[in-house]
Amino acid sequence: MVDSTKAGRTRRWMGIAGAGSIAIALTVAGCSGGGGASSGSNGAPKAAQDDKAPITVWVDADRSKAVDAFKKANPDAKLNVVTYDGSANGSNSFRTKIQLFDQAGSGWPDVVFSSQNNDAAWASQKTNGKQAYAAVLSDGLVPQSTLDNFTKGSLNPCTVEGKVYCLRNDLAQVVLWYNKSLFDKFGYSVPTTWEEYQAIGEKVAQEHAGYIVGTVGDAFAPEIYMWSGKCQANGVTGPKEVTVSTGTNECKRVAAMLDTLVKNGTTPNISVFTPEFVKKYADKVLMMPGPAWYAGAIFNNPQSLNVPKGQLGVAAPLAWKGEEAATGNVGGGTWFVSSHSKNLKAAEKFVEFVTTADDYQVNLAPGFPAYAPAADKWIKKQESSGYYAGDLQALVKAGSEIWTGWGSGIFSQEAIWAKTVTPAIAGGKSLVDLLPEWETAIKNQAQVNGYTVK
C-alpha cells in the first residue's frame, strides 16, 4: 500500500505480516531438474528448471524474521538473501531494478517482497516486448486450495484480468480504534456510523478541547477516509483503465465531515509518525479510524502513544447511516515469484511458506495475516495477551469488508494526496473545495502512466 510519504517506520509497519499454516506439496508442470526451456505458467518462455538451483530472495529488513523462520523449517534450502528497501515510501525501487534487469537480460531475483499493493499492475505486464516479471500463480504454481484460503478480497491487488500474480502478506483493513477508559470517563458510546462519529467529534471540541478523534496529516489519509467512504477517486477497472470522480455525494460527505473536524481541532493535519504528534496527543486520542497495523505501530508502542494495557479497544468499520459498512486498506505487503526463475518449485515453496506458515505468520508476524487460517490463530494469540479492552473480532469482520471500488493502479494515490491536498489543508483550504483539484491531479498522473481515464 503503501505507499505514501509515511515516515520510514510507517512503511515498516504497513508492510507487516502475512499468514499461516501449510507444509507445501506443489505440482508444477515442467519443473523437473534441468529440463529444456518451455512455456511458463504465464505463457512466457520458462527458464530450464533445476530443482537444486539456489534462489535469490529480496526482502526488506522487517521480513528478515520470515526468512529466518523458513530457514529453520527448511535447513537444507539454498537461499541468497538480499535486503532492500521494499519499495518503501513509494521509492519504486522494485520496478526500477527489474527494468534494469530486463535491459540486461539477466539478474532477476526469484522472489521479491514489496511493501506496495500496486506492483502487480506493472509486474504482470510486458514492457517494450520484454517478458513480464511476475509469474502467474493461479495457473497451477500455487495450489488452488491455498489461494482459496486467503481472506475474501485480499488477493484483489494481486489479480490482473483474472490471474493472480502475487500472494498477499498481510491486510491493513481500516477499523475504529478507541480508548475505552476515555469513553467511560466522558460518558460517550462508541459510534457505529460516520454521522455518530462526527457528532462525537463536535462534542469533544466543546466539552474536552485538546482531545482528538482522528488525523489527516499522513499521505494515506484518503485510504482511511475516502476509500472507506466509497469515494470513486481510484476506480481501476483494467490494466490501463481508471474511473475518477470526486464530485460524487460519497466523496463530498467525507470531505464535509473532515472539514468540520479539522476546523474544530479534533482531527489535526499532523502525521502520526512525528514527535509533535506523540508530544501533543500521547494521552489525548479518544478514537481514531486507522489500519490494523496501528495497534503495534501507534498504540502499543513505547516510542509512540504507548497506551496502557486494558484501554485500547477496536470497533468495526463505520457505516454511513442506512448503508452497509465498507472500509479502506492502508498497506499490506506482497510476495512475487519471478517468471524467469530457474527453480520455480523452490521459489513457490518459499512464498507459500512466508504467507501461510504458522511458524512465521502466527508465531512471529506482528500484522494481521491475509491467509484466513493464520489470521484466526493470530487473533486468538493477540487476544490472549490481555492487552486489549475486549476482543479483536472487529478486525476479522473488517478484513472482508474492504471496498472493491478502490483499485491498485501503478500510480500512487498517496503521493498525489501528499502533493496536492495535504499542503492545501495546512494552508486553511476546505477539503470540499479541494475535491476538483484532487480529481484533476489524479487524472493527470493516471494519464502520465498510460491510463485511459473515465
Image (cartoon, rainbow, N blue to C red):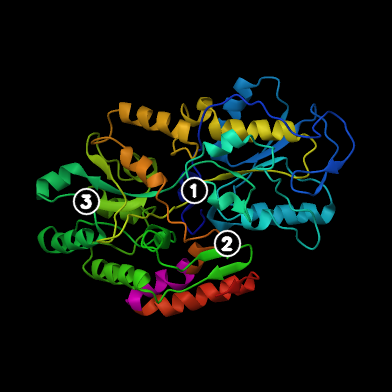
Q: Relative to 71, say whether 38 is above or below.
A: below
Spatial distance from mark 3 to mark 2, Cα to Cα?
34 Å
Q: Residues within 10 Å of mark 1 (few under 14, many from 20)?
A: some
| Circle nearer the N terminus (2, 1) | 1
Residue designated by label 2: 409
Q: Relative to 16, say whether 421 is above or below.
A: below
On the question of residue 387 being in view, the answer is yes
**Residue 317, position in %: x, y?**
32, 51
Q: Which mark is residue 153?
A: 1
Under tag 1, what secondary structure?
Answer: loop
Amino acid type at circle 2 is: Gly
Question: Which residue occupies the foreground of this view, 123 or 213?
Answer: 123
Under tag 3, what secondary structure?
Answer: loop
Using the rendered view, name the quadrant where residue 141 is placed: top right
On the question of residue 80 being in view, the answer is no
Q: Residues within 10 Å of mark 2 (few under 14, many from 20)?
A: many
**Residue 64, position in %: x, y?**
57, 34
Residue designated by label 3: 286
Spatial distance from mark 1 to mark 3, Cα to Cα?
31 Å
Question: Which residue occupies the foreground of this view, 273 or 310?
Answer: 310
Amino acid type at circle 3 is: Leu
Residue appearing at x 39%, y 44% in the figure: 297
Question: Which residue occupies the foreground of this view, 212 or 427?
Answer: 212
Q: Which residues are magenta?
A: 417-432
Q: Relative to 201, say whether 381 is above or below.
A: above
Q: Residues within 10 Å of mark 3 (few under 14, many from 20)?
A: many
